[in-house]
Image (cartoon, rainbow, N blue to C red):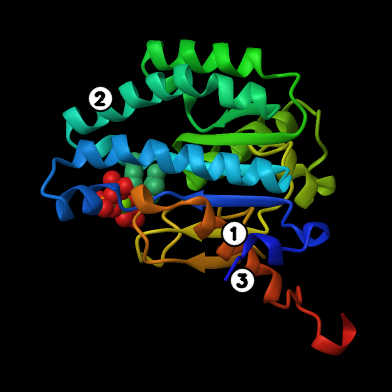
Amino acid sequence: MDFKSNIIVEKLPKHIAIIMDGNGRWAKSQGLMRVRGHEKGTKAVRETVEACAELGLENLTLYAFSTENWKRPKLEVQTLMRLLVSSLKEEIKTLQDNKIKLQAIGCIENLPSKARKELREVIDKTSDNSHMTLTLALSYGSREELTQAVRQISEKVKNNIIDSETIDESTINKHLYTQNLPDVDMMIRTSGEKRISNFLLWQMAYAELYFTDILWPDFRKENLFEAIYEYQKRERRFGKTSEQL
Ligand code: IPE
Ligand code: IPE
Ligand code: MG
């Protein structure tokens, strides 16, 4: 089936978030080192970004490195950081050609200085692009994000900038890294794992979850189109009854 031509453009999700998982298992299945899987995964990133741009999707967020991923072997972490730098250098043209703005969420200050510098450059160069926002979650953890939000809000309450009585959901939204993004409409996770792994817990409160067994390095445009096609068949009720919609 040609999923792409069956997607209803007017009903595209406003924000897709993807947990790009399965690089290590892909490498193992090929008899390769884990890092080879991460290298292969960069092609899937390009395909996905291009597919979203082709459809006219407004917001794509990719989980590239979690706060917990720092616990991995040093060589693997170094390779992931090196790949981040080289991918940023290589993909700047794709971003510019498709008018994609890049931004990053997470504890960016924890990244090596080379990665921070490259990231800063690409963010600056693409800041005027307006067709799509590509958000990279780097050294990102939802609990860390919520914790820093609570810290900031408490500080403001203490300094009489915020009256605690007025704190509502929008106050929390404004103190998250994702403050400029809409809620996640669909979350895709590859590799067959069915968990959230500390990704956008607050923002995904009403997201449609889509799990596929495909390992991230094998993920292609057609797989993304299929996921969106599936999303459009679902009924999102947000607590209401079917008849009320
Ligand atoms: C996802 O693939 C990439 C990152 C977490 C950085 P994994 O490296 O988690 O691959 P598996 O889960 O071990 O197969
Ligand atoms: C989640 O994948 C993080 C990223 C894809 C960057 P993991 O492979 O680290 O998640 P767990 O540990 O299996 O839950
Ligand atoms: Mg994994």
In the image, what residue occupies the spot 85% across and 46% down?
166
**Lower sequence index among marks 2 and 1:** 2
The kind of residue on which mark 3 rests is Glu
Type of amino acid at the residue the image marks with label 1:
Phe
Measure the alpha-carbon separation of dots 1 and 3. Answer: 9 Å
Q: Residue 133 or 10: which is nearer the viewer?
A: 10
Q: Disc 2 designates what residue?
A: 78
Element marked by disc 3: helix
Is the CB of mark 2 within 8 Å of ligand 1? no
Point out which mark residue 12 bears: none
Q: Looking at the image, is mark 1 or mark 3 nearer the viewer? A: 1
Disc 3: which residue: 230
Residue 66 visible from this viewpoint: no
- Quadrant where the C terminus sits is bottom right
User: Visible in this render: residue 120?
Assistant: yes
Q: Which residue is mark 1?
A: 225
